[in-house]
């Protein structure tokens, strides 16, 4: 997965992308948006090269509304080029299940057993 975003060219933003487990808000509908509210001015970017089926095996969709997912998340990024970041790690928070990992080292993790096998 890749995040396409243009962070401001300031010290705070450049320091942010070097951190692990950055708090963010993920909104998934037709597009997959990642919102960073911890910056002085909220910024969001779009995720490319993601697989809805693989994501939903690890983080189930909600019901109704414009977003199938509207979740607090933590994300770790690796710069690829100007405005492009590889998503290294991604976990989503669910009130009833806690943190569900989606990506680790840029690979979809083994699902944590949220689906019945029946």
Image (cartoon, grey):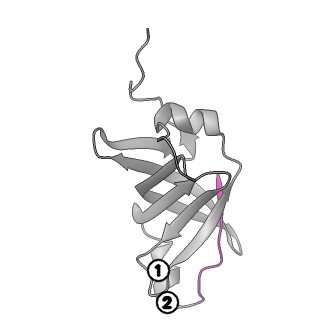
Quadrant for the C terminus, please.
top left
Question: Residues in magenta?
Answer: 1-9
Q: Is residue 86 left or right of residue 39?
A: right
Q: Residue at x 48, y 72 (%)?
A: 36
Quadrant position of residue 48: bottom right
Q: Main secondary structure of the magenta part?
A: loop
Q: Which mark identifies residue 69? A: none
Label 2 element class: helix
Furthest-bottom residue in view? 10
Q: Residues within 10 Å of mark 1 (few under 14, many from 20)?
A: few
Q: Nearer the viewer, residue 105 or 56?
A: 56
The answer to whether residue 4 is magenta is yes
Secondary-structure class at tag 1: helix
Circle 2 sits on which residue? 11
Give the residue at mark 1.
15
The reply to whether dot 1 and dot 2 touch (C-beta < 8 Å) is yes
Q: Label 2: few (<14), some or many (≥20) within 10 Å?
A: few
Image spot of residue 57 (x, y percent) = 52, 31
């Amino acid at each position: 997965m890749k995040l396409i975003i243009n962070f401001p060219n300031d010290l705070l933003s450049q320091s942010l992308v070097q951190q692990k487990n950055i708090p963010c808000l993920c909104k998934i509908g037709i597009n997959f948006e990642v919102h960073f509210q911890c910056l002085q001015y909220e910024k969001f970017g779009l995720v490319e090269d993601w697989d809805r089926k693989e994501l939903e095996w690890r983080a189930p969709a909600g019901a109704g509304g414009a977003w199938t997912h509207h979740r607090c998340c933590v994300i770790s990024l690796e710069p690829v080029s100007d405005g492009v970041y590889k998503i290294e790690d991604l976990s989503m928070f669910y009130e009833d299940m806690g943190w569900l990992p989606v990506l680790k080292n840029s690979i979809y993790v083994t699902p944590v057993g949220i689906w019945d096998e029946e």
